[in-house]
Amino acid sequence: MTNTQVTLVQIDNYGPWTVTPEPRREADLQTLQSRLYADISQFVGNRNGYVFFTRFDNMIAVTNGLDLEDHRLLQESVGNRYPVTLSLGVATGTTPAQALSDATSLIQDAGSAQDENRREILDGRTIDTAYRTAEDLQIAHFDVIDATGEYTDELNAFDSFIEIEQGYASLMRYMRHAHDSLSFFVGGDNIIVVCPDLERADYVDAIEHVQSEVDVALQVGVGRGESAHDAGYAAKHALERCRARGTQVELDW
Ligand SMILES: Nc1nc2c(ncn2[C@@H]2O[C@H](COP(=O)(O)OP(=O)(O)OP(=O)(O)O)[C@@H](O)[C@H]2O)c(=O)[nH]1
């Protein structure tokens, strides 16, 4: 059974900060957000986790393998180097959406995202090393079949973007509601989905749903592992098998 450890990363009191004492230049905010994301991605990635930028002021991380001390160090390092601080809620669960929901409650219960007195909350629990297994995570790596030929080389860059985003929107809603899974656009035509224990038929259904709802053709490789990196890397290899064999779903087991 999967056991996903999810961390909600929330910038403290960010909304007010962006307009105090007056609105800050948008390009500076974009630079801050993308640098902060890059730093967190490097920190979490070096410990075999994944972090997704999501809304930038709220980021979602899969942190199997990171303990609370790692989380504390991330807060300290960001607090020392950025004009903003982070609150972190950590929870585990058999479905990613449930784990995220619990992680979110920990932060919400400590105060509003726009409460200037709520800073650097760290709350929750991590998976004890002794209980970690190679089945803890299931990660699916989707991409659009021949995005280059269908869209990138055919439409202008914005119309291609609309098509890809429609595929993402359809898939993320389906996976959230049918399977308690969390889907993240990671660039190009790629979507990484953090899933509970699903089977081949579930992925076939997801692909058919997106095809019929928005007419975007997806393929998917699925991997399992004890860390996000292990599961995600296995998924990438499985996706390569889709490309080599012309199949739409490949599982790494
Ligand atoms: N984040 C991420 N992006 C990727 C990855 N592989 C490819 N991309 C992005 O996806 C874009 C399209 O590449 P592909 O998916 O290989 O191209 P395609 O035309 O869809 O071809 P097929 O996937 O073979 O059908 C690239 O320009 C990258 O931006 C990956 O593993 N991770």
Image: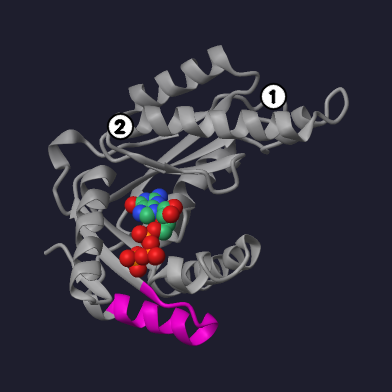
Picture quarter containing residue 85? top right
Q: Check if mark 2's residue and mark 1's residue have beta carbons within 8 Å.
A: no
Q: Position of residue 160 (x, y in %)?
A: 57, 66
Residue 217 belongs to magenta span: yes
Numbered range of the magenta stretch: 202-218
Q: Is mark 2 within 8 Å of ligand 1?
A: no
144 to 7, vertically: above or below:
below
Residue positioned most to the bottom:
212
Q: Is residue 170 visible?
A: yes
Q: Amino acid at mark 2?
A: Leu
Residue displayed at 55% across by 39% down: 107
Task: Judge: label 1 CB < 8 Å from ligand 1.
Answer: no
User: Which residue is under mark 1?
Assistant: 117
Q: Position of residue 51 (x, y in %)?
A: 42, 41
* Residue 150 placement, left or right of 135: right
Quarter of the rendering containing residue 125: top left
Relative to residue 81, is residue 11 depicted above or below?
A: below
* Residue type marked 1: Asn
Is 233 covered by the magenta stretch? no
